[in-house]
Amino acid sequence: MLRFLLVRIASAIPVLFILSVVTFAIIQAPPGDYADYIRSQLINQGGASYAQAEAQAQAYRVEHGLDKPMVVQYVNWIGGIVTRGDFGYSMFYNKPVADVVGERLPRTLLLALVCHIFASVLGIGFGIWAATRQYSWIDSLLSGISFLGMTVPRFLMALIIVYLLVFQFNVSEIGSFFSPQYGGAPWSWAKFVDLVRHVWPVVAIATFGGLAYNMRVMRGNLLDTLNAQYVETAKAKGLTGGAVVMRHAVPNALHPLVMYQGVVLPYMLTGEIETAIIFALPTVGPAIVGSMAVGDVYVTATFMMVLSATLIVGNIIADMLLALLDPRVRQFGGA
């Protein structure tokens, strides 16, 4: 198993390098940079002339290396990461990029993991329930819920919830994790309850989408597995229906969902972008969109690298889980 893990990690390193090159090139491709943002701010809000604003913008480019070719900027950025663990300096947030990531990534990961756990447990459970009651009203109801979860856009669900909270229930504390009185307070049960009151819409929306996918896949796979010959053999041996389903059918039906774990974490992180922007939560999503809007290239590139890394790590974890679940993967995968 250790060899299996080392092979996966070794193959991920060049992939991550290629992704960093492509990501940086795509971010730099559109015309304009943060100096252009400064120039527009000086003209629109500072009352400076175009010549004065352009001179200050050019001086800013020279000072921060934005006047150098894209290749030089990339080498400086990736060199700082490899040699010093320095991800660059955020021009918009006026702090090191590592601080921006450190503030927003943990809470985003926590939200994504909570949503993933809820979506997996509920989705797999409902999928088993629907498959074992095929064509019943329970199956029809759960299939309808699955269809809605996979087709209704997340931003639309977020907008509807915001409308109901603000205009129907007069909720004013939207856009933060805590109420003002709990912002710097130590952790307590009251603070936890306050956190849940603020983040439940994001958790509910992300969970609903993941739940729908898990339920749909689990139902389809389990129906195929229940018709397999070894399941019929288990029934013929006198095993109860529950034992046949849980001990023989469900473990084999879980294989595609285990592989899905390889993409679920970045899926949750990127899916969080839509709802976090609507609710204005200080997480990864608004930081990516905001930095792209003003040309804060190092913040955008670092967060995109984080998403790429989570995709790679997720696939490695999925490979490990599948290897533990299926001995054939260990045999032919080099474990």
Image (cartoon, helix red, strand yellow):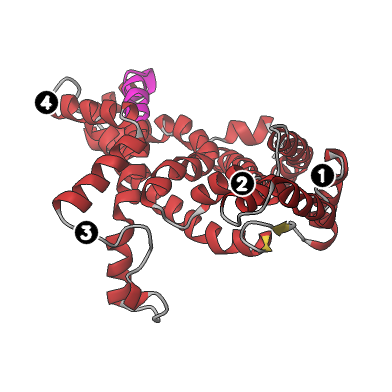
Q: Mark 3: which amino acid?
A: Val
Q: How far apart are marks 2 and 1 (CA)?
A: 19 Å
115 on left or right of 308: left
Dot 4 and dot 2 residues touching (CB under 8 Å): no
**Rendered location of residue 85, percent (x, y):** 77, 61
Residue 137: assigned label: 4
Do we see residue 238 in this rendering?
yes
* Residue nearest the viewer, comparing 57 with 101: 57
Q: Mark 4: which amino acid?
A: Trp
Q: Distance between the residues labelled 4 and 1?
A: 58 Å
Residue at 68% from the left image edge and 57% from the top image edge: 91
Residue 294: assigned label: 2
User: Neighbour class for label 2 at 10 Å: few (<14), some, many (≥20)?
Assistant: some
The local secondary structure at tag 1 comes to helix
**Rendered location of residue 121, percent (x, y):** 33, 45
Residue 74: assigned label: 1
Magenta stretch: give its range.
Answer: 216-231
What residue did someone put label 3 on? 171
Q: Distance between the residues labelled 3 and 2?
A: 31 Å
Residue at 87% from the left image edge and 44% from the top image edge: 68
Residue 258 among magenta residues: no
Q: In the figure, 267 relative to 100: above or below?
A: above
